[in-house]
């Protein structure tokens, strides 16, 4: 049943939220079938147990109906639980967003033709919005939306003397939102063009107008996007330092999604420097990630973002901070998502991978191979990282007559079988790594595979390649 929508919803709830959902389901508001509540009681009982095998619809059928012939009814009951869960999640979200709740109430009042009350609701939503310190993208969209609602409201549209003033407000807030949204996506396009060394052929029209509008706004977010675009076009240390200060300050009041997006832009900039041979950027990448962790920017609900968690551990290990990595893993292992998968949980697989990175950095190569193996099977992203880790560790063990080629061939097969999910850029970067590893394994007995050969190969390779810094170290360690 783990693939059902309801079970996936359930897996993201905290214990307090599960208790609140239980009360929500039992309330008179929901006219649920008795068997639906029985199924919920069964799920609540069984899915709180750890180390148990995965429960199936047949198991649920036996528990709820007394036989294994009612799996179709179990599917229907799960669908009903999913509907109630969606109502619960929406209510939870509204309770955490008073401005959004107020704007939804405005829609309710409009739908019921309560003209005067809906006008008062617009004013209430505007006051709530203005009292919040956040000046994020959502703020500017809501400013426009409320100005739009006020202008087209039945009672304000009749006030001829104020109509032009209201319309100017609508256009002002629309321009602000449009400028910020367009600049953000232009930054995304330009950043991807830099990372993948390609021209996507997307034309950014009216850039001068957008920059002028953002400049006139003189808001923290508009200044950030102006400087970010400047940094992408002309990378300078002074621009980066200025932008970093602005981003760190904005993170105190920005929305979660924008916090992560802006911090990721800074990390990507340092990653580009790293790709261009500026190895001091790795320390800065770690500092940025550590800042994101300390300020919970990389939290998704009650759990850490898995990619950021893994990247932080891997980066720390690459700069020798294995003690920090081990301590962070120990302190935060319960803050990783667990999808209640069969056998070893998703959480344990992620931890195996991270422990493997620590092993590799400490020179514990046998342990790194073991942890890389134990990390599979998992999601495609974790599987991909575990394969690169295993190949790296096996290379370190090459003098112990351990066959690395079998693992490399299996890695290549994995890339081929998952090319649709991974995407062409990821496939190419890992294929380049595989080609380089095959040559490195033959370096001891192939005359042309010397330091100069591999240096030229990496210098010629302008496109991304995974584990580039590690490869550089292995090349420099060659005897010839």
Image (cartoon, rainbow, N blue to C red):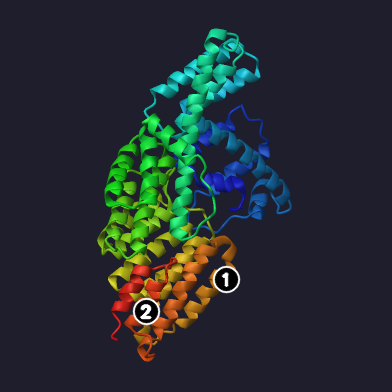
Gap between marks 2 and 1 measured at Cα: 26 Å
Residue nearest the viewer, comparing 366 with 216: 216
Q: Dot 1, how many residues are within 10 Å of its Cα: few (below 14), some (14-19), or many (20+)?
A: few
> What residue is disc 1 on?
416
SS of the residue at dot 2?
helix
From the viewer's perspective, is 27 left or right of 18? Answer: right
At 46% from the left and 73% from the top, the residue drawn is 432
From the viewer's perspective, is 33 left or right of 280? Answer: right
SS of the residue at dot 1?
helix
Q: Is residue 82 above or below residue 432?
A: above
Q: Dot 2, how many residues are within 10 Å of its Cα: few (below 14), some (14-19), or many (20+)?
A: many
Residue nearest the viewer, comparing 164 with 118: 164
Query: Is residue 143 visible to us here?
Result: no
Q: Is residue 480 above or below residue 384?
A: below
Number of marks present in the image shown: 2
Q: Is residue 479 above or below residue 80?
A: below
Q: Nearer the viewer, mark 2 or mark 1?
A: 2
- Residue 157, image x and y in percent? 59, 12
Which quadrant of the view contains residue 39?
top right
Label drawn at residue 30? none
In primary-sequence order, the first of circles 2 and 1 is 1
Which quadrant of the view contains residue 256?
top left
- Residue 480, image x and y in percent? 29, 86
Residue nearest the viewer, comparing 331 with 202: 202
- Residue 422, image x and y in percent? 54, 62
Query: Is residue 62 visible to us here?
Result: yes
- Residue 98, image x and y in percent? 47, 25
> What residue is disc 2 on?
454
């Amino acid at each position: 049943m783990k693939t059902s929508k309801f079970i996936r919803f359930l897996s993201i709830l905290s214990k307090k939220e599960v208790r609140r959902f239980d009360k929500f389901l039992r309330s008179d508001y929901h006219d649920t079938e008795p068997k639906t509540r029985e199924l919920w009681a069964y799920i609540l009982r069984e899915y709180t147990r750890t180390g148990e095998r995965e429960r199936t619809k047949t198991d649920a059928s036996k528990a709820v109906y007394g036989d294994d012939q009612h799996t179709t009814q179990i599917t229907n009951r799960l669908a009903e639980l999913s509907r109630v869960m969606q109502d619960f999640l929406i209510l939870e979200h509204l309770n955490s967003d008073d401005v959004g709740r107020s704007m939804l109430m405005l829609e309710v009042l409009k739908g019921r033709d309560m003209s005067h009350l809906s006008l008062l609701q617009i004013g209430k939503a505007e006051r709530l919005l203005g009292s919040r310190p956040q000046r994020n993208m959502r703020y500017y969209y809501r400013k426009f939306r409320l100005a739009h609602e006020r202008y087209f409201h039945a009672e304000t549209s009749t006030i001829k003397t104020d109509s032009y003033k209201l319309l100017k407000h609508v256009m002002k807030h629309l321009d602000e939102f449009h400028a910020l949204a367009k600049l953000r996506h232009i930054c995304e396009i330009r950043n991807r063009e830099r990372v993948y060394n390609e021209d996507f052929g997307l034309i950014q029209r009216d850039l001068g107008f957008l920059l002028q509008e953002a400049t006139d706004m003189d808001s923290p977010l508009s200044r950030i996007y102006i400087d970010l675009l400047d940094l992408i076009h002309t990378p300078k240390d002074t621009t980066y330092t200025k932008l970093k200060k602005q981003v760190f300050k904005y993170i105190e009041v920005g929305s979660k999604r924008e916090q992560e997006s802006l911090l990721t832009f800074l990390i990507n900039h340092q990653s580009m420097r790293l790709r261009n041979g500026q190895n001091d950027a790795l320390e800065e990448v770690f500092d940025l990630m550590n800042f994101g962790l300390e300020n919970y920017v990389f939290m998704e609900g009650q759990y850490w973002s898995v990619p950021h968690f893994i990247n932080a551990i891997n980066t720390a290990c690459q700069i020798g901070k294995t003690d920090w990595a081990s301590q962070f893993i120990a302190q935060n292992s319960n803050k990783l998502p667990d999808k209640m998968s069969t056998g070893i949980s998703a959480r344990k697989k992620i931890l195996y991978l991270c422990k493997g990175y620590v092993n590799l950095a400490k020179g514990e190569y046998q342990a790194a191979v073991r942890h890389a193996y134990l990390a599979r099977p998992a999601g495609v992203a974790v599987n991909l990282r575990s394969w690169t880790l295993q190949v790296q560790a096996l290379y370190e063990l090459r003098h112990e007559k351990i066959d690395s080629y079998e693992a490399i061939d299996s890695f290549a097969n994995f890339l081929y079988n998952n090319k649709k999910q991974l995407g062409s850029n990821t496939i190419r970067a890992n294929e380049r790594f595989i080609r380089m590893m095959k040559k490195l394994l033959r370096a001891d007995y192939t005359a042309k595979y010397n330091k100069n050969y591999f240096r030229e190969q990496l210098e010629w390779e302008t496109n991304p390649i995974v584990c580039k810094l590690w490869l550089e170290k292995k090349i420099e360690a060659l005897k010839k």
